[in-house]
Image: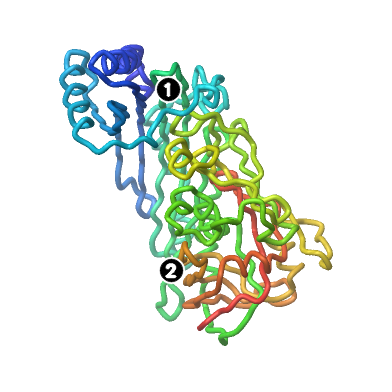
Amino acid sequence: MEENITGMLSAEEIRIADKCVEKALALGASKVRVTLNKSLMELFGTLDGVLDKVSHCLDRSMSVCLFADGKYGSFSTNRLVESELNDFLAKSIATVRMLAEDPCRDLPDPERTAKDAKTGKELGLYDPSYPSLTSSQRLKMTMEASVFERHKGEGLISEEGEYSDSIFDTLTLDSNGLRCRHTETSFEYGVESTIKDSEGNRFSGYWWDSKPRLSDLQIATCAETAYKRAMAQIGPKRIPSGKYNMVVDSENSSRLITPLTSALGAFALQQKNSFLLDTLGEKVFPEWMTLIDKPLAKGQTGSRLFDSEGVAVKETPVILNGVVKEYFVNTYMSRKMGIAPTIEDVIRPALEPCVAPGLEKPSKLDRDGIMALVGEGILVTGFNGGNSNSATGDFSFGVEGFLFKDGKIVHPVRETLITGNLKTLWNNLLAAGDDARLCKSKIIPTIAFKDVDFSA
């Protein structure tokens, strides 16, 4: 019973997963992969400093990838009862046999799979204090984090806070002998504050933090930060359309990395839906730009020892001194494209600190230091919709933020659009900081670019 309370996979659930592999082979599957997932989340929410909602969610599922007669199918169930396995697997294998042959489907080479993910806790992402955390403690933290009573006479008209903690436990097995496990806890608090200025205009600010260990969670300052971010938006002004230097803070900078890593994925490449097609080994970006996949950082959000196939991951240069060094290719796409497999996706991309040649490196490579380095331009503190074309790299994003001059904020900016091409944008990289938010799985700091098109 205790294992159900803590959200950890039980010995019985693991035994059923092992039986699933055994029975699938006995029923005619040539190969099989089983992934068993279990998660538990507790959530407490406040509205204007008063408890507003409580949620408890326990989820469990088992997905089964079956290979039979050169064909492939994927199935899932949340019924982990041994007496029901035969019927579930027999029907699943019968369905697979009705499908078209797919010779590219296969399990990964056992030589490539993880061998050191035995307990799930090797990366230090599990907080052993999690099982002893009580509802009273959760409620106390949530209520004490609110600043509504402190600021409700100072423009604050609404505050929504939400504390949650969760545990995720996954086990991946296959008929080639793969057996790897990943266990992590997460503690998160986020709050949105809405304020009203003297003219009745409303502005909102949001801030959050998340950590694998409760003792590292910065819950006490979140609501105050959200309130200040909302207040800072009072008095926005339009700016003339034109080219500006752009600084994107570390809360939002990963928005501009995601299209790059997506374009390096084999699915986009194979469909010729990538603006980085045929660029492996080519210098596409400025030589001072380096992006490293760092999936093995102990105790850090987003770290993993293996991908969904069970393939072992490692620290890998993705873009090194401007040169594209890695495509992300799983077993299926490797066989389909006739190229060597890597892993299925970038796990934890980290942009290295840098300053473009000719610029003097500031004493601190944080947001303020980079604004001082750039001098004047637009500080982007939020994205409001928009999209990018994965085939061409052209983009159009709505943004909000602040005009700054002499490295200092002058006034807020809203209802502004940035447009351009991602290759051009990144080749205009002026600097990348060292202030990435470690609560995120993409370790992207404050970044600055020159000559970005802004439209009012």
Residue nearer the viewer, 197 or 6 = 6
**Residue at x 21%, y 24% (from the top left corner):** 79
Residue 6 picture location, percent across and down? 38, 22
Residue occupied by mark 1: 131
For label 1, the SS is: helix
Residue occupied by mark 2: 386
Picture layout, residue 119 above or below residue 101: above
Relative placement, left or right, of 224 versus 46 is right
Res 62 seen here: no
Mark in the foreground, 1 or 2: 2
**Residue at x 38%, y 31% (from the top left corner):** 136
Q: Residue furthest bottom?
A: 240
Residue nearer the viewer, 22 or 289 = 22
- Amino acid type, residue under disc 2 in the picture: Gly
Residue 451 picture location, percent across and down? 66, 76
Residue nearer the viewer, 170 or 224 = 170
Please tell me in which quadrant of the rendered image residue 242 appears.
bottom right
